[in-house]
Amino acid sequence: MTTDALEQPMQDNDLRILRAAAIPTALLGLIAVVAAALIAGSKGALGAGIGALVVGVFFTIGMVAVAYAARISPTIMMAAAMGTYLVKILLLAVLLERFSDATVWDSQSFSLTVIACTICWTIGEARGFLRLRMLYVDPEVKVPGHVEEKR
């Protein structure tokens, strides 16, 4: 592995998947902020905004970690994906429980936004991955012992 490969944080495919998840989640977060402001006032908007921000930060960090691990080894990538997913879900559950009685913002707006944005991110990430056109076979590789036909 070259040092150039380690200097670039994410490959183009990873960035496409990140955009496929982050853009719909940001839009849903914005809708949640507006809806919470209409329903619960400024505390609702603050709770929804913080909830959307928490999901965006957590899941972006997770994607960057998995993208970095993918450059090292597929086995490490799978372990990183499973580990970051477990940590994200546990931390989100702890945050939802810890801030359920918060008085600074509306805890219901916070909780519902976190749940909705988590679902949106997961669907967007899966959709982005399914729409990705990646070769899983390198057509330029020469097979040892195989005689190539002349054209």
Image (spheres, grey):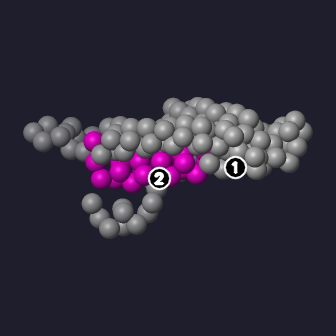
| Residue that appears at 64% across and 33% down | 115
Q: Is residue 15 above or below residue 90?
A: below
Q: Which residues are magenta?
A: 55-75
Query: Callout 1: 10 Å neighbours few (<14), some, many (20+)?
Result: many
Left/right placement of residue 48 relative to residue 10 reads right
Left/right placement of residue 91 relative to residue 114 reads left
| Residue that appears at 61% across and 32% down | 119
Report x, y in % for residue 30: 77, 44
Report the front residue among 106 and 20: 106
Report x, y in % for residue 111: 68, 36
* Mark positioned earlier in the residue sequence (2 or 1): 1
Whether 138 is among the magenta residues is no
Query: Mark 1 — residue?
Result: 50
Q: Which mark is residue 64?
A: 2
Report x, y in % for residue 79: 33, 41
Report the front residue among 17 and 136: 17
Report the front residue among 132 and 25: 25
Q: Secondary structure at mark 1?
A: helix
Query: Which three-letter amino acid code belongs to the residue tagged 2?
Result: Val
| Residue 63 shows up from this direction | yes
| Residue that appears at 28% across and 42% down | 75
